[in-house]
Amino acid sequence: MDFDYGALSQLQHFSINNLGDPFIESNYGVHSRQFEVGVLDWFARLWELEKNEYWGYITNCGTEGNLHGILVGLVSASLILFIFKIW
């Protein structure tokens, strides 16, 4: 696959890994909190949510997002999980 990453070169100087809750200050100096909160703020404005009405974080992949969704469902006791065996 031939892809030119030149347009992203300026962003490659930043750490894209955030450790922990993006809304809580960390003692770890290398993080992406500002970018992560910026993405969450953008979606909150899109869905017309007030600052105190949302929380979240940006996952690194779909699997992490799915696992976190299952965890939230289990903790809130409102989860109905459908599991399909494919083979």
Image: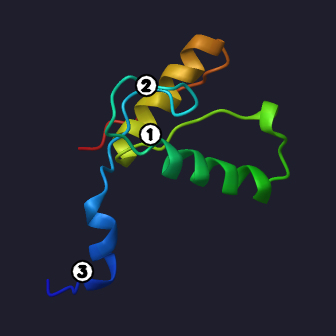
Amino acid, disc 3: Tyr
Q: Which mark is residue 65?
A: 1
- For label 3, the residue is 5
Q: Is residue 40 above or below residue 75?
A: below
Q: Tell me which numbered mark, 3 or 2, is placed earlier along the sequence.
A: 3
Residue under the point 52% across and 47% down: 34
Residue 82 at least partly seen: no
Q: Quadrant of the N terminus?
A: bottom left
Number of marks drawn? 3
Closer to the observer: label 3 or label 2?
Answer: 2
Quarter of the figure with residue 54: top right
Closer to the observer: label 2 or label 1?
Answer: 2
Label 1 Cα neighbours within 10 Å, binned few <14 / some 14-19 / many ≥20: some
Q: Which mark is residue 44?
A: none
- For label 2, the residue is 26
Q: Specify how the rendered protein is coloured.
A: rainbow
Residue under the point 20% across and 85% down: 3
Q: Is residue 38 left or right of residue 6?
A: right
Q: Is residue 75 left or right of residue 48?
A: left
Quarter of the figure with residue 78: top right
**Tag 3's secondary structure?**
loop
Kindly check if marks 2 and 1 are in contact, taking CB atoms under 8 A apart as contact: no
Q: Nearer the viewer, residue 43 or 24?
A: 24
Q: Tell me which numbered mark, 1 or 3, is placed earlier along the sequence.
A: 3
Closer to the observer: label 1 or label 3?
Answer: 3
Amino acid, disc 2: Ser
Q: Tell me which numbered mark, 2 or 1, is placed earlier along the sequence.
A: 2
Kindly check if marks 1 and 3 are in contact, taking CB atoms under 8 A apart as contact: no
**Tag 1's secondary structure?**
helix
